Amino acid sequence: MSDFHEKDLIAADIEGYLEKYRGKELCRFVAIGSVDDGKSTLIGRLLYDTGMVFEDQLAALEKGKRLEDGSIDLSLLTDGLTAEREQGITIDVAYRYFATEKRKFIIADTPGHVQYTRNMVTGASTANVALILIDARKGVLEQSRRHAFVASLLGIPHLCVCINKMDLVDFSEEVFDQISADFQAYAASMKLAFKTITCFPVSAKNGDNCVTKSPKTPWYQGQSVLGHLETVPVAQDRDLEHFRFPVQYVIRPNLDYRGFAGEIASGVVKKGDTLVSLPSGRSSKVKAIDVYEGELDEAFTPQSVTIRLEDEIDVSRGDMLVHAHDLPHVRRTFDAYVVWMNETPLDREKSYLIKHTTQYVRAEVRDLHFKVDMGSLENVPAETLGLNDIGKVTLACRRAVYFDPYRQNRATGAFIIVDSLTNSTVGAGMIAGERGEASQGLDAALAELRAGSSMMPKTQVSPRERVERLGQKGATIWLTGLPGSGRWTLAYAIERHLFDLGRAATVVDPTGESLETMITACKACTDAGLVTVCAFPAYTPGDRERLRHHIGEDRVVQVFVDTDLELCKQRRPEGDFEGFTRPEHADVAVGLDKMRIDDAVKRVMDALEARGQFRAG
């Protein structure tokens, strides 16, 4: 339980308590586990046994559904959503806060099911420690290996393996040792990048080795889970060597003050240091480091400060200040691991926005090297990434970004991917590379910054984006028939009908054109997402095959306007009726001498609908 002195201090001197609280070191940890492994119960136990449950919460627990032995269900402190309680699983990320004499904590209780990988990534992205729950009766399962893999990929430095439900195996030392050895062997085989891996024999339900050491495990010489969380060296995980300062805001209240505000992503800065601004490459010395309380002689991560420079150099939001002798990587292309977080799959034909530190840059996926099979954890070939998939990609950016490998710096090595059409966050990325990789010199970095876009010179609007924006796919309706059959009358009627429905459609004007130029024009309009209507003569099977080949087999709807030959000759006595071959496999056949033109338009529309031409709604 919390020390009485701390509760007494709250009652006697709230300002003193708050000052003491502000001075405590913060530890963020995430709890990960499979269904029924007990992670929510473990978090509830930590909160309950440290006295961090509010009276109304405790009252609700007392009145709530109890466990079989009559004890209160501590998992309800975090499994707060009705849907979660009904299914018995954690779906969303639940955050809880508590403090002890030594530290303050932020807990993220994340879902363990593979279909909620994106939620787990959200909760774990800023964690110092990961708590993985393993059922002592079941041992290291596929889910446990997957959770450890994802936690390692996310760069969490410390891993706590809580072997739970030890009371159900009679607190067996042999069971604990075997599961610990199995897990350590797996971590070594996968080269998981944790600084420390510590195993604990616990019973979250009964509180054994959660907050205090349990007498039921006299053979266990380690700390309790809370004792470990209070002492794990999280401050040492900060990168104090490489100074990175992404500029969040330029502060200029008057002509005599110009400061650059932001959070120090890593490293230390002092008055008098020479800093280089990227991308301009201009340098200046630090004149002052300002915070709310006044000036500082030095500042370090993760402080938020305002830096003033001696010279008026070009610095704006999205730029980065670094030490001249210690540059980040400056590149327009780089490899990254990406977690896809949207129901709409990765579209390799479109460009996205990536938000990296404080800047947005347009980028495209140049290569998708593989995705991770979340069952076997093997790398498998893939054409795209779907919801909750993890894969390795090469990104090409319109301009260079300045970064460090994610393993070295989680702030400058991470980014999110934003769909610029919907403004939704669709992915989270971690830049690949190892700690300490050498970056290029200043001249090479500046050359990269001044180079043109590394994105391929092509349209930045993908076919899928056009469908999302227009609500339709591009298509060509090509009307074939004899002179005088009414092809062009039907073409313009189709255009009118589509326009009245709010669809984007056009008739390609044939004046003075050849079949080749008409095919080219129809392809361009179809590529743009329009429903393109054309009635230019395509008399032979060879002509029709050529237009299908160039425009796209699945994008051409061939309509045969089958009007009686004698009627056509009466209408167009000067017409050329030689060389016409009736289409054998037209998609739609209509005779304007046998039906109203409105009925003919409806037949064409039915054919389009049957192809899934238009999105619902």
Image (cartoon, rainbow, N blue to C red):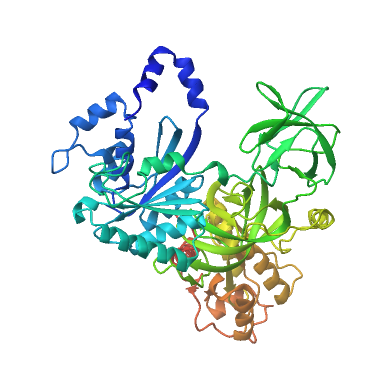
Horizontally, is 2 left or right of 294 in the view? left
**In the displayed structure, would residue 309 be above or below residue 462?**
above
Q: Identify which residue, 518 or 9, lies in the foreground.
A: 9
Q: Position of residue 96 (x, y in %)?
A: 39, 36
Q: Let me know if residue 173 appears in the view.
A: yes
Instruction: Please give the name of the residue rendered at 36% of the width and 63% of the height, measured from the top-left corner.
Output: 181
Quadrant that contains the N terminus: top left
Q: Position of residue 290 (x, y in %)?
A: 71, 26
Horizontally, is 237 left or right of 456 in the view? left
Q: Position of residue 475 (x, y in %)?
A: 57, 66
Q: Position of residue 256 (x, y in %)?
A: 83, 22
Q: Let me know if residue 399 appears in the view.
A: no
- Residue 101, by quadrant, is top left
- Residue 72, by quadrant, is top left
**In the displayed structure, would residue 527 be above or below residue 262?**
below
Horizontally, is 578 left or right of 17 in the view? right
Point out the residue furthest to the top here. Answer: 12
